[in-house]
Image: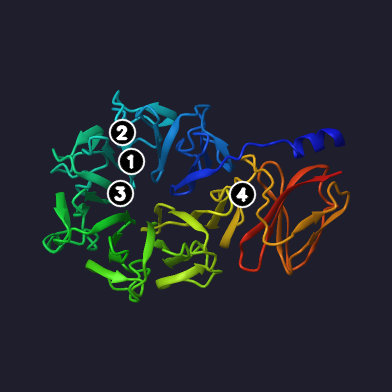
Amino acid sequence: MLALLLLLANSSWAQLKWLKVSAGAEFAFALRSDSTIWSWGFNGNGQLGNGNTITNSLPAQIGTDKDWIDITAGSMSGFGIKANGTLWAWGFNNIGTLGDGTITQRLQPVQIGNDNNWLTIECGQAHTLAIKTDHTLWSWGFNYTGQLGLGDTVNRHVPILVDTSHQWVAIAAGGYHSLALKSNGTLWAWGSNANGQLGDTLAAISTLSYYPVQIDVATDWKSISAGFQYSLAMKNNNSLWAWGFNGNGQVGDGTNVEKKLPVQIGNGQSWKSIAAGGASAYALNVHNVLYSWGYDGYGQLGNGGSGQQNTPTITDVDSSWKSIAASDGLFYNSSVFGLSCYGLKTNADIICTAGANYIGQLGDGTTSSEDVFNCATGSLMIGVADLDNEKGNISIYPNPTSDKISIKGIEQPSIVIMNLMGQKQVSSHGSNEVNLISLPAGIYLVQVFGKDGELVKSEKVIKE
């Protein structure tokens, strides 16, 4: 038995990486570097794409295909684009959200039409936007407030061309409104404007816009993200802007007053990327430090339970964040909140999560919520090999071990030990020794974090 464990522990596991995470209402997807897609969390509408409606608290592969290049989570649906440019969808479909011409729920990916030139896709509460490689804009699904941009409020069950322009380069789908960028740097919006989420002077006198309307005359917008009733955007100078509903501080201007026009936020910092959740917002600055603001009812801001923040506030001083994905809105007491958040770091190929976990949506194998980011999800699902990038000469011994391990070369480390399913088994903070007597024999991943939360050592350990 020991010989087998040694063989497994020392084998050259593939250095696979998570490339993207996308979050739905109570579930999430991830795209891996081997072009496979994975899902976890609530599955009542088949949104995990695994052929059933069984909820899963650990990442599981969707099918066996290895040709996916993009993945996007809607509120209760999933979408993926393959390397051949085809579009696939699954999950909730009662109002045509998937675009397959039906209102039939799909438990696993089905191809949408026969086109093979899809470039990118975004899904809101129940409507879907997509851009093709010719930079045309398409929409389908729920259209109660004109969020499809087609001039009416009729739902569509298949993709419909929004206009004849070939300039669309980015899209964002909110609860009931839509945003898009053109290649000339102009920003456009349509759909519900009940709380000023369209951000346009002319549209401000109306609660709806059935067609895309340009937001001001600026030609230097470069990225967008849409929350349930508010919007975020960045300009070419890396400034951060927000507008719309602000009852939970999600606009981030220090007030709770809704804004019908874009206002600059973020104290003049330079920003790199943005993510708008249901009522919680996130941004990375150019130094890869994570900030969050807005609703924090489930700890999804990752700030240790400090509560609602009305301005962008540092969530984690670690400067190795690579990307962030905010949970879409979930209806609760006539309000919509995104309850969880997911992120990737550059120094460790694992998924960091914070917020609600009552149904396993954080994917760490538990139902325990987190009010700080826990970097454990999917760590062994990707075949993590030993990392030799420790800061200094850090060692884990003895290995193999029968009762405990010790960490040498670092003071007051935080230690997390997980099994081969990615489930956290033991954790320790501030001690250089961890007792493993309660664990059964097998292979475990030991991760050592420094005082600043940075992963400094990762090694497979055999428990005899």
How far apart in space, not on screen, are marks 1 and 4 (Cα)? 27 Å
**Mark toward the start of the polypeptide (2 vs 4):** 2
Q: Residue visible at 31% across and 37% down?
A: 119
**Mark toward the start of the polypeptide (2 vs 3):** 2
**Mark toward the start of the polypeptide (4 vs 3):** 3
Q: Which mark is residue 173?
A: 3
Q: Residue furthest front?
A: 392
Q: Residue visible at 15% across and 62% down?
A: 216
- What type is the residue that disc 1 sits on? Ile
Residue 325 in the image, given as x and y percentages of width and height: 44, 53
Which residue has dot 2 on it? 118
Which residue has dot 1 on it? 121
Label 1: which secondary element: strand
Label 1 or label 4, whichever lies nearer to me, is 1
- What type is the residue that disc 4 sits on? Asp
**Mark toward the start of the polypeptide (1 vs 4):** 1
Classify 10 Å Cα crowding around label 3: few (below 14), some (14-19), many (20 and above): many
- What type is the residue that disc 3 sits on? Ala
